[in-house]
Amino acid sequence: MMGPGRGENLISGGDVAFPSTHWSLVAMAAQAESGDEGMAALERLCAAYYRPIYAYARRKGSSPEDAEDLTQGFFGHVIASGLLAKPEPGAGRLRTYLLTAFRNFAAKERRRGLAKKRGGGNLEGAAIPRTSNRLESDYLCVADRQLTPEQAYERKWALALIDAALGDVGECYARTGRKGLFEQLRETLIGTFPARGYGELAEQLGINEGAVRTAVHRLRSRFREALLARVSETVVNQGEIEDELRHIKSVLAS
C-alpha cells in the first residue's frame, strides 16, 4: 500500500486513447452466471470495491464481524438483485453509485438485525476477500487517520485501483520473462525516486544509467496505461477518465 501523496507521479503525464465505455466491468459482472468472463469481471469488481466498502462500514461504526457480513451480503445482493444490469440514468461514477447502493442496503440490513448469513447471495466461486483478519488489518492502515467514512472509502478505492494496475503490469513483465526487472524498478513508481538511486539500480541490473532511466520511463508509461484501463471499466464515457485520474491524485494527496 502507498502512503499519503505517493502515487501522484504515477498518474500524471501522457495521453492514452481508450474507446468510449459504459461501465464495461459492470456489464460483464452482471452476467456472472453466464460463464468465465462474467465471473472474472465479478472478481475484478470485488477486488476494486470490497475493501473500500468494508472500510466505509467500519468507519461508520460497525464491528469487524458486522462490517464483513454487510460487505459480503451487499455484493451478493448486487448480483442477485440485478442492480448492475440496468443502472439508473444519470447514475454517475461507479464508485458513487455503489456507495449509495451500499448505504441503502446497510440501512435495510440494520433494520432487519443483520439477519443475512455470511457468504450469502450469488457469489459462489468468486475469488473475493473472506478473511476477517486480513480485511481488518487492511482497514487499520487508515483507521488512525482523521477520515470520514466517505474519505476512508475513497482512499481504499484509489489504492485498490493502483494496486490492481501494478498487478497488471507485473503480470505483463512476468509473461515476458522480466519479473525480476519489474520488482527492482517498481520502487521508482512510489513517491519521488532520488536521482542517485538510478546509479545504484544501474549497478544492480548491470546496465548503464541511461538504460535504467529508459526502463523506468517505459514502466511508468505502462503503469499509466494499466491504470487508465482499470478506470475506463468504471466510467460512462471516455471524457470521465481524466477526471477520475485527477480525483485519485487528489484522494492520495489529502
Image (cartoon, rainbow, N blue to C red):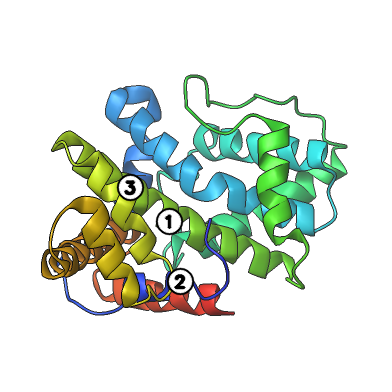
The residue beneath circle 3 is 183
Compared with 135, 209 (above or below) is below
Q: Position of residue 252 (x, y in %)?
A: 53, 72
Question: What amino acid is labelled 2 in the image?
Answer: Ile
Q: Which of these two is toward me, 205 or 243?
A: 205
- Give the residue displayed 40% in from the left and 41% down from the top: 44
Occupied quadrant, residue 167: top left
Label 1 close to label 2 by CB (< 8 Å): yes
Residue on which disc 1 sits? 161
Report, in whole angstroms, how far the alpha carbon at label 2 lies from the one at label 3: 24 Å
Q: Which mark is residue 107?
A: none
| Residue type at the position of mark 3 | Glu
Of residues 217 and 248, the one nearer the viewer is 217
Rendered-image quadrant of the C terminus: bottom right
Amino acid type shown at disc 1: Leu
SS at mark 2 in the image: helix
> Which residue was labeled with disc 2?
248
Q: Is residue 9 left or right of residue 4?
A: left
In contact (CB < 8 Å): disc 1 and disc 3? no
Q: Could you say which is closer to the camera, residue 120 or residue 165?
A: 165
Depth check: give the residue in front, 1 or 215: 215
Q: Earlier in the sequence, mark 1 or mark 3?
A: 1
Give above or below for 77 relative to 126: below
Whole-percent x and y of residue 31? 35, 33
* Element carrying mark 1: helix
Q: Earlier in the sequence, mark 1 or mark 2?
A: 1
